[in-house]
Amino acid sequence: MNAVLRQVSQQLRYRALAGLIGRGVAVTSVDSAPLEVAVQLQDRLPSGARFKGPEAKYIRIAVAKYGILDLTFLVDSLLWSADDAPGIPLLENLGFVVRDPATSDGPGLLDDNDPTCLEQLQEDINHEDAFVKLFLEERPNRTLKERLTSSTQLGAALSGGLDVLDNYFPRTFEVVDACLTNSAFVWFHKHFYF
C-alpha cells in the first residue's frame, strides 16, 4: 500500500479555482444544468472544457435529495505547474490519507485493505485526463423537511415517470468548491453523498 501512496502523492495534480467560489449560476432544468453552468462560468473555465458527467438521472437525484450539483468537465491539453502537486498534505486534506493515532511517524493508513480507496484514485490518475470539478449548492437552501419530502417522493417519481422537480426550477446555485485535477475521483471523501 505504501507504494500506491507514494505514487499517488507524486502523481495527483490539484489546483483550487478560488475565483469561482461564490459565483451564482441560474439553472432552468436538470437537463440544461451542465450547459448553463458552463456558459455562465466560461470566463473562469479553461477553454474547451466539455461536460463529462454525471448523467441527468444522477443530477436529478442529487438536486432532489441534497440541493447540489456535482459536475465534472473534461479539459484537453492542460499544462500543470509544480504547485499543482502538493503531495501528502493534499491527500490528507481530501481524506485519502489518515494518520494512525497510535504512531506519529508520518502519514499512513489505518489498515492494509485500502480503506480510503487510494487504488481507485491511482487508477483514475493513470488515465492521464484533466478535469474541472465543480460543486454547487442551491440558493436559497431548502429546509431539511423540504429535502426529505423530495427524497421520499423521488423513488416513486422516478419509477412512475413523474418529475419531483416540476416546480423547483428556475433556481440559483452557488459554486462552493472548484478545482482542476487529473482525477475525477478526487472529491470522493470531500463531498460524499448518496
Image (cartoon, rainbow, N blue to C red):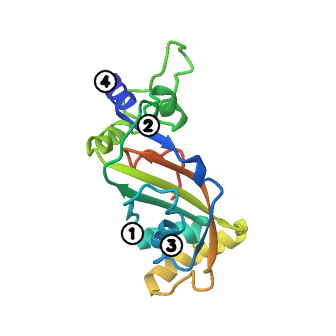
Question: Looking at this view, is 32 or 45 the one in front?
Answer: 45
Q: Residues within 10 Å of mark 1 (few under 14, many from 20)?
A: few
Say what secondary structure mark 4 lies in: helix
* Residue 65 located left or right of residue 38: right
The disc label shown at residue 188, or none: none
The disc label shown at residue 116, or none: 2
- Name the amino acid, label 3: Glu
Say what secondary structure mark 1 lies in: loop
Q: Position of residue 38 (x, y in %)?
A: 48, 66
The disc label shown at residue 3, or none: 4
Closer to the chain start, of discs 4 and 2, is 4
Residue indicated by mark 3: 36
Residue indicated by mark 1: 55
Q: Residues within 10 Å of mark 3 (few under 14, many from 20)?
A: some
Question: Looking at this view, is 70 or 74 the one in front?
Answer: 74
Quarter of the image holding residue 174? bottom right
Alpha carbons under labels 3 and 2: distance apart = 34 Å
